[in-house]
Amino acid sequence: MRVPQVVAISIAAIAIGAVFGAALASAQERALPLPALRSGITFAGSDVRAMQADDASNPGFLWVESGEKLWNATTGAAGKSCASCHGDARASMRGVAARYPRFDATAGTVQDLEARIGDCRVRRQQAPPLARESEELLSLTAYVALQSRGLPTGVTIDGPARAAFERGRAFYEARHGQMNIACAQCHEQNWGKRLLSETMSQGHGNAFPAYRLEWQSLGSLQRRLRACLFGIRAEMPPPGAPELTDLELYLAWRAQGLPLEAPGVRR
Amino acid sequence: MPDARISVPPSVARGKPFEVRIIIRHAMETGYRTDESGKSIPRNVIKTFTCRYNGDVVFSARLSSGIAANPYLRFFVTAKDSGQLAFEWVDDNGVRGGDSAAVTVA
Amino acid sequence: MTTNLQSRPSRTRRRLLQSAAAVALVPWLPANAAADELPEIPALTAFLAGRKPRLARVHLTLPQLADNGQTVPMKVSVDGPFAPGPRVTAINLFSEANPVPEMAVFEFPVAVDRAEVDSRVRLATTQRIVAVATMSDGALYATAAEVIVTIAGCMDGT
């Protein structure tokens, strides 16, 4: 790459980073240009949009309310609640979900929000671990993620996160399953087109954890990714698998700038 | 898990219908699903729902598996005086749930 | 009375709408603002017990094309005025194609100026829903609405 190009891209990256307050340390091109980013809600039908728009009728808030109770409840051998260290989540957790997945030095790996909450539970509260998709973990994740609602996604993919990011991108672009389809084929090349009566979205995870009508329950982004893999008849990695976290990181980078919507509603 | 999420206006006009919204945490299991081993999951839905205002029933519903999980109900109530809305529901297993919300008549 | 299902215009419309290329994202519209006839549902026939409801005053609002048959927003309302005069005492909902045809009964034990209920229904397949309002003087009003329910684009095995 010639020097003027490097300079131009760096200035653009810094400008975007400054505008959104995101640490876009990488000077890499975006997968989708920022103005072309569209949240999954824009591909949803009127019922789903109406449910997400109204907090009083959004079923995801059942988990948010539960999460708030759990946040304030003492648990574990340490006799602490989340609030004991983090105080009011509305202040302390603001912007946190928007930065996940994230490399955690203590864990020595990239973690999604669920893993980070689970870690705190075990390490700090000395409480039993929370299973993926358990009511408690979903509730806490929903409550924490709500505190970033409306804030733009902004993850770091440099340094120790780089390897996970590259693995995530490779997974996204590789063909999988009996149907031998790559994520990119539907969500990069064919978004906006029909799959039976549904319109294919750009495949962003900014609304998760989300109440999915198909699940009749709130669920994590990892669950949604596993469902997608099932759909193309691929083997699903188990919940919490590193491949899923790598993919989450790639997706979050791909959705840089898109506001969080959790708890979202999806079909 | 909270039983329900309730929404009523912060204050209501005397004698004028006001909106009550409630989402109840319940799987509304239809009885037509099977688990991973192929065993049928028995039906368990909320059968009856009652809303009382200051003791009097002002709205009730009989539901079925034809009502979606985490049932949502929005209906209207009229109040002359400030008071308490009391919600109650029972499912096929006989498990009762309930919640309440205060109403202030301006 | 048997209806020739193939010749009913709504069936042709439904087939057209169901073809992948033709389905457009339809906005939230009252599916049948005024039904000219009610579908034949045995549970409905049993409920009516020979009475004939007037096809007026009741409004049933559901999306024309459901995002997911598991959870379909539904609004049912009955036009006033109610006081003075008969008020709504109950609204019964019937399904044409669900395994359980009596979907719900909404009961109004006291007078309320606004006889309107929102909920979310489960629809097993494309079908018509019927709402029957019973008044305090025994009069019946009814309407029907049709909802198209399709299967998901991708199966979800989680």
Image: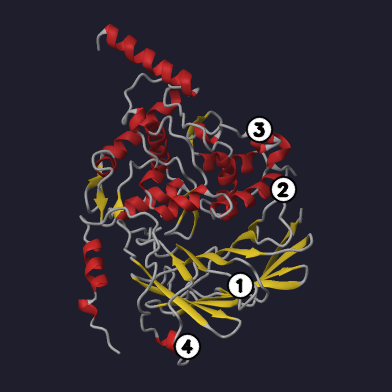
Q: Residues within 10 Å of mark 2 (few under 14, many from 20)?
A: some
User: Mark 1 highlights which residue?
Assistant: C82
User: Mark 4 highlights which residue?
Assistant: C48
Q: Position of residue A218 (x, y in %)?
A: 51, 54
Q: What's the chain of the residue with tag 2?
A: A
Q: Which mark is residue A91?
A: 3
Label 4, label 2: how far apart the Cα atoms are: 53 Å
In the image, residue A140 sits, relative to residue C22, either above or below, namely above
Please name the residue shown 49% across and 74% down the image: B65
Please name the residue shown 52% across and 39% down the image: A113
Label 4, label 3: how far apart the Cα atoms are: 58 Å
The answer to which of A84 and C14 lies nearer the viewer is: C14
Please name the residue shown 53% across and 28% down the image: A105
User: Mark 2 highlights which residue?
Assistant: A73
Evaluate if marks 4 and 3 touch, with contact meaning CB atoms under 8 Å apart: no
Please, which residue is most extreme toward the bottom here?
Answer: C50
Q: Amino acid at mark 2?
A: Ala
Residue B96 in view (yes/no): no
Label 4, label 1: how far apart the Cα atoms are: 22 Å
